[in-house]
Amino acid sequence: MEASFIVNLHYSVLFICFFIIAAALGFTTDLIHRDSIISPLYNPTKTHWEKLNDALRRSTTRARYFGLSDSRAMVGSLVVPAGGEYIMNISIGSPPVTLLGIADTGSDLTWTQCKPCVQCYNQSLPIFDPRKSSSFQPIPCGSPICSSNLATSDCNSNGDCTYSYSYGDKSYTYGVLASETITFESNSFSGVIVGCGHDNGGSFNEEGSGLIGLGGGELSLVTQLKLTIDGKFSYCLVPFFKTSLVGKISFGPEALVSGTDVVSTPLIKKSPSTFYYLTLESIEIGNVNLGYKESRIKYAEEGNIIIDSGTTLTLLPQKFYQDLEAEVKKNIKAEPVDDPEGMMSLCYKSDRDLDVPIINMRFAGADLELKPWNTFIKVQEDIVCLAMVPATEVAIFGNLAQMDFLVGYDLEQGKVSFKSTNCSQFQS
């Protein structure tokens, strides 16, 4: 991913001034859990437990996809938008057309379905027609970005650069790369590279129209807007059981996480660059500190876990998880029960209040004390389970563990910061 990211975009002096103003002010927009009653993806025909178990299944399948060889096409989320958990609205084009998708830190390319459709899945929102956008400019095959490994390096009959992504559930999108205007509420940015998908299929949800990539790769929105937003973005995830509330995602100076109670841990650069790698050194339960381990090593190497907004559960190496589960069992004076869905490893009857131990995640330079709703999840009315499971491919710090924390990414300083926060306070 060392390819130059030079695209022939000619900005006016006025637009450059706007960029400077936007960078100084920053911007914030809503971040809504996909199963919230105020979410456009809300499905009233599914019970709370059905939706929850759908999310848990997506965690394990998504983890397997993340563990695939680096030779795959540029990474994207597992299912779009069903493979992620929190959604955001942006607009694309001039005049702007709504793009609704998962805010996904595990994906790069932002794309939407486009007319004319060779094959498009059904969607409720109007399909974007690039012929009606005055700011749409296809990327030519001769562009440096097209000759890099960020695209397929193929050309269509018009000489436009094409892309082709396939996802873990065999969903796919194929189309052209283009320079286009992206709008976050009242803040517009020209010359953003997006995907215009003319051939898309698989398990995509008809309420969504694409994906919003917030990963660390060259094509992600945060990388493309890096200078404008000073390399900073943050989010505050409202617990999913607070179904009528929204969280916030901020970019630029507004995304700065500060205060005496902020803890920070380094971002580790590894391949693929899409993912945000952290170093988990140990997990503390009560007075017992469990050192990170996996089958091939017995110490915490740098960048051993991915922080991901699109994965629900936290996944840990098998050996490390076994030590964790054994210690949790020692601290809970109740008899474990089986998960009826067969997905969770450690569950208890919840017909009475459980005395749940405090769990601290010890990242390099940052100790994170998790709340009970970060570590245990009610999977049925009378059953609660540990919201951590053994990983078969890659370790992931999921979004349940991140709820009610202000999580800030500083790509300039190379760190992720955490601040315990009541995310429900950020209401419109």
Image (cartoon, rainbow, N blue to C red):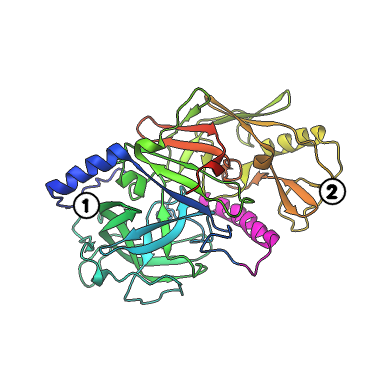
The residue where tag 1 is placed is: 144
Q: With respect to residue 339, does 269 lie above or below?
A: above
Visible residue check, residue 273: no
Give the prevailing secondary structure in the magenta stretch.
Answer: helix
Q: Left of 421 or right of it: where is 25?
A: left
Q: With respect to residue 184, does 302 lie above or below?
A: above
What SS does tag 1 mark?
loop
Q: Are marks 2 and 1 in contact (CB under 8 Å)?
A: no
Q: Any magenta on residue 63? A: yes
Stretch in magenta: 44-68
Q: With respect to residue 2, does 42 lie above or below?
A: below
Find residue 294 and report its horizontal and vertical position in percent.
63, 36
Residue nearest the observer in this picture, 59 or 245 = 245
- Type of the residue with mark 2: Asp
Q: Left of 331 or right of it: where is 214?
A: left
Find residue 360 and report its horizontal and vertical position in percent.
64, 30
The quadrant of the image that shows the N terminus is top left
Residue plotted at (60% across, 32% down): 297
Find residue 116 and report its horizontal and vertical position in percent.
31, 76
The residue where tag 2 is placed is: 351
Label 2 vs 1, first from the N-terminus: 1
Residue plotted at (21% across, 52% down): 144
Mark 1: few, some, or many residues within 10 Å (few <14, many ≥20)? some
Quarter location, residue 353: top right
Mark 2: few, some, or many residues within 10 Å (few <14, many ≥20)? few
What SS does tag 2 mark?
loop
Q: In the displayed image of the protein, which residue is found farthest to the left? A: 13
Quarter location, residue 161: bottom left
- Type of the residue with mark 1: Pro
Visible residue check, residue 25: yes
